[in-house]
Image: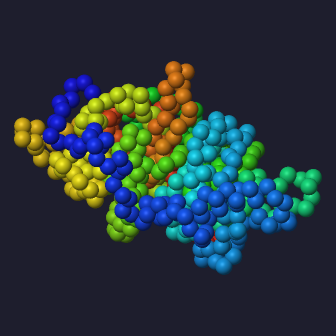
Amino acid sequence: MSGKSAHESGTSPVADDAAQDETLDEPQDKTARAQQESQAPTSEGPGDSSSASDAAEQSEGASTPDGADQPEKLDATGTPGSAGKPSAKGTSRRAMFTGAGLGAALAGLAGVAGGRAWEASRRPEEAILTTYPFRGDHQAGITTPAQDNMFTAAFDVSATDVEELKTLLSEWAVAAEQMTAGELIGGQPSSNKQLPPKDTGEAWGYKPNGLTITFGVGKGLFVDADGKDRFGLAAKMPAVLKEGMPSFAGDQLHAAQSDGDLLIQACSNDAQVCVHAIRNLTRIAFGTATLRWSQVGYGRTSSTSVDQETPRNLFGFKDGTNNIKAEDSTDQLNEHLWVQKGDDAAAAWMTGGTYYVARRIRMLAEIWDRLRLIEQEQTMGRDKRYGAPLSITNPTKSSEEFTAVDYKAKDDKGETLVPADAHIAVVSPEQNQGRRMLRRGYNYTDGSDSLGQLQTGLFFIAFVRDPRTNFYPILDRMTKSDALQEYLKHEASALFAIPPGIKEGDTMVAASLFS
């Protein structure tokens, strides 16, 4: 990168890895160990050896009695009971469909589906059988441990009658609760074969795979483009939505891929389970709301639990080390994540909710890949191998990733080891008056463009109590002074209010908005 000095003494010996170990350090966290164990030969569970997996795959084509492939029921607590044990065929590799109806989004999924489905056949049983409660004080899919896959969709409401809107939100609640429990929508298919089934069926026989479905509402649900009240809800519009997201330096946003009236985020440990959720909820919305944009994501780019290892972004670096975790104190979560009583008098219904901000950020991979290692590390502010901050001159283990950054540390030439424009120096909480957000982004790859360059990058997602204080100032600094910006293009943006959780007795999504 032009104009950046090279502090050769401040980097790790990654470039010399050929003379050292050929692999990175052994994973230390529970998730990584489970993944390793699931790939080892074993006689139990769906993570069997390849021969067992292949045998199960062959068995899929055999005829079975009606209902034999029905998803197992879960107990009242939302955890697998005796009926939730894996079937004999386990989770074999599945051919992913390209489907119609969701257009380019499903086509984009096809690029990663085969590999993800193959991986699923060796995934630890726990990840396959996991369920998360659909009802509670907060919606699932926020502090929930980040799953492997994401499919997000935004909708424009075409209906003009508030009762039609409420009917849609009620039907979505029923369907989402069934799907997150690993059940078919509407239960068993109708015996009348002249009627279309209530469930599309592509997840028939699949386990829950930790599916979460999170709903949000946008500014367009309250007022139209002229500011006219649409459904009698304008007086309840949060100030955050009313003000909207400001413009930032270098924005190249596509309006058709930004914002919307309603939001659905589906996350799961199986890509096809995500597709099944969005596909069915889209179908239910027919006649009331239309799909505005959608985004498939794979490979989480942040950890939301202390049990998860910090993943690598598509530039090959660990990013988001200082992310909010579900295990953080209640005081921390209330300060930075959950809307509190009194935050917005007009939007008291948002208490216990949060705000969703997203940025589709294309990563210029071809340019980045030609940078010298030292330039890559100085741009990020971290060692590429271990994720340690560059203030550690010779990191040797992955635990050093969590060492506090010394922004004043200098090399023997008096040069600051962590450049002032390095990514971590610009966006870290300690450099931004302690501001924090819960990051929950995913990688995306949508093939290549007309020039043969990868259309790949980060679908950045953050949940915050108030983006005006905990997100906009950080993004503003990043777009103006972060060295990483040279290799990024901000192509889309979204802002939604995420209502509090769907509580027992609630019959619809965002019930508090209509109470």
How many marks the image carries: the answer is 0
- Residue 479: x %, y % from top left: 33, 34
User: Residue shown at 35%/47% (left/top)?
Assistant: 22
- The image's colouring method is rainbow
Whether residue 160 appears in this view of the structure is no
- Residue 132: x %, y % from top left: 56, 67
The image quadrant that residue 186 belongs to is: bottom right
- Residue 486: x %, y % from top left: 33, 29
User: Residue shown at 21%/29% (left/top)?
Assistant: 4
- Residue 3: x %, y % from top left: 21, 25
Is residue 495 placed above or below 214 in the rendered structure? above
Say left or right for 235 vs 472: right
The image quadrant that residue 329 belongs to is: bottom left
Name the quarter where the C terminus is drawn. Answer: bottom right
Nearest the eye: 512 or 235 = 512
Say left or right for 381 vs 134: left
Whether residue 363 appears in this view of the structure is yes
Nearest the eye: 42 or 414 = 42
The image quadrant that residue 191 belongs to is: bottom right
Name the quarter where the N terminus is drawn. Answer: top left
User: Residue shown at 52%/57% (left/top)?
Assistant: 147
The residue positioned farthest toward the top in the image shown: 451
Say left or right for 443 vs 214: left
User: Residue shown at 22%/51% (left/top)?
Assistant: 395
Nearest the eye: 56 or 81 = 56
